[in-house]
Image (cartoon, coloured by chain):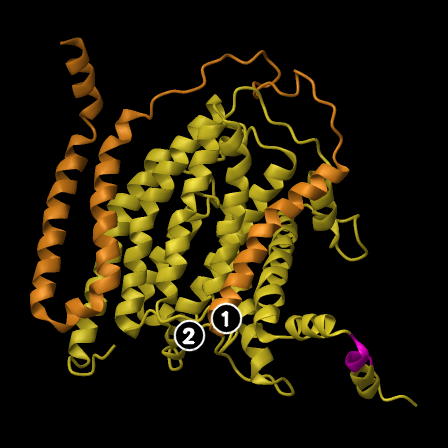
Amino acid sequence: MIDPVQAFVQVYNSMPPLIQELIRFLYSEPFIKAAIFPGALFSTLLGMFAVWFERKLFARVSLRVGPLHVGRVAGILQLIADAIKFLSKERIIPEGVNRPLFVLMPCLALILSLLLYAFLPFGAGWIIYPSDIGLLLFFLVAALSPIPIVLAGYASRSKYPFIGMSRIALQLFGYEVPLFLALTGVVLSTRTLNLEKIVEAQAVVPLAVTQIIGFIVFIITLLAETERLPFDIPTAEGEIVFGWQTEYSGVYFLMIQLAMFEKVLAFCFLGAILYLGGWLGPPIPGLPESISAPFWLILKGLILFTFVALLRGAYPRLTIEKVLDLGWKYLIPLAFVNLIITAGISLISGYSAITL
Amino acid sequence: MDTALWTLVLYLILTIVAPPIFYIVSVLIAPKKPSRVKRMLFESGQTPIPARVAPFPIEYFPYVIIYIAYAVFAVIAFIVVLDMLRSSESLVRGLIILAVITAGSIYASTQLPVLKQRLERGGRG
């Protein structure tokens, strides 16, 4: 019998130094984190899973079966078939569009959406870039993400994308303020911008209980920021064709769709981290904490995503005036009320205890 | 380089190469038979009417003003809220900024319903 470990060591030692270096690099912590978990491979697979999951769930809500034929179980390979379909479509750039913007903006949208995962901790130590201002960095990237969308609509130079673009500009920028204010409440009650410390602060009770108003505001702004129903007036299929994405097809459309789903999921995970206690959960017998922690967080994030996806089956679309009224007239005051309550509790519960 | 930063740089490189990979796969497997009809803008099968760029709807202009004011305040609050809580002086300053912004936005929202008529009147006169 040959010992596989020893055989590997022998083969490894007989390799040229350059390949040895490469193997060491592939096995190093930075590469595993950046490329596998919680990095590129994980976020891409998760995005594809979410597309399938949402289609299946929405089909069940409307008494259909959903993806069925591709793949042995429940059409699980449908998402791969869809990806291949989009990739094998002809790349059409319509007449009169602003070509550089039209081609670059879907790429930029995808890059920005994927970049959100760099700041999300999936367990103690399971984070690509741990930082004391993690929440701020996340929102730096999230605040940039409307720009490629608005420019993509502008670059199409056509009327349906234009209508969708003007709607999405109003909607995304309008809901950014309540989102910031809701998160200010979280920062105020946990006294840190570090996402890992925010999770640790929820060891006793999750912030969804103590920050219930902030949590409601966060969920509504999540839906609006990621264009989910009932806030999908910028794409509104059946009214303005497909809104700002009308002129996009093939690989560009695939990139936009993937970017949108990655963004929804990143926001769902952020919600789970900030309000639902993150990776804290009962220990699973037989599993080390380094595996059970990401499991709980992914479970919580997917539960939040299920809720978001179910709303698609339950609500009709709001008109743009109502969307703006809700954001400016109700959510911002609500977020301020939440902030004032939190500040009051913080002041009462111990002025001297405040340390950064 | 420190490990965390190096991980971030690696991840950034991976995210930046993702769109070109999609594009290259598409170049390899997609057909290429361009025609004029395919390149026309979407118009439900009709000949497109070339009304391509329109001004932004003016009815929503006050929202832009409110947005600029509140976005700045929200970002400031997000960053300095802990300091505000610690010293009463900066809390008072924060409340003054908030009061000014709120006064401005209340004015803007009262102007919102009548703005369109005022603009039309101005245009005629």
Q: Which residue is mark 1?
A: A127
- Do the residues at discs 1 and 2 belong to one chain? yes
| Secondary structure found at label 1 | loop
Taking A312 as reference, is A97 above or below it? above
Give the magenta-colored segment's residue range.
A11-15
Give the alpha-carbon distance from disc 1 to disc 2, as whole Å. Answer: 9 Å
Q: Which mark is residue A7?
A: none
Along the line of sight, the residue nearer the viewer: A322 or B76: B76
Q: Which residue is mark 2?
A: A196
Chain containing the residue with disc 1 = A
Chain in orange colour: B
User: Is A125 colored magenta in this rendering?
Assistant: no
x, y percent for residue A73: 78, 57
Taking A283 as reference, is A241 above or below it? above
Q: Is residue B15 left or right of residue A196?
A: right
Q: Is residue A333 left or right of residue A266?
A: left
* Residue visible at 34% across and 22% down in the picture: B55
Chain containing the residue with disc 2 = A
**Chain A color in figure:** yellow
**C-beta proximity under 8 Å, tags 1 and 2:** yes
x, y percent for residue B86: 15, 73
Residue kind at label 2, given as amino acid type: Glu
Q: Is residue A164 left or right of residue A342?
A: right
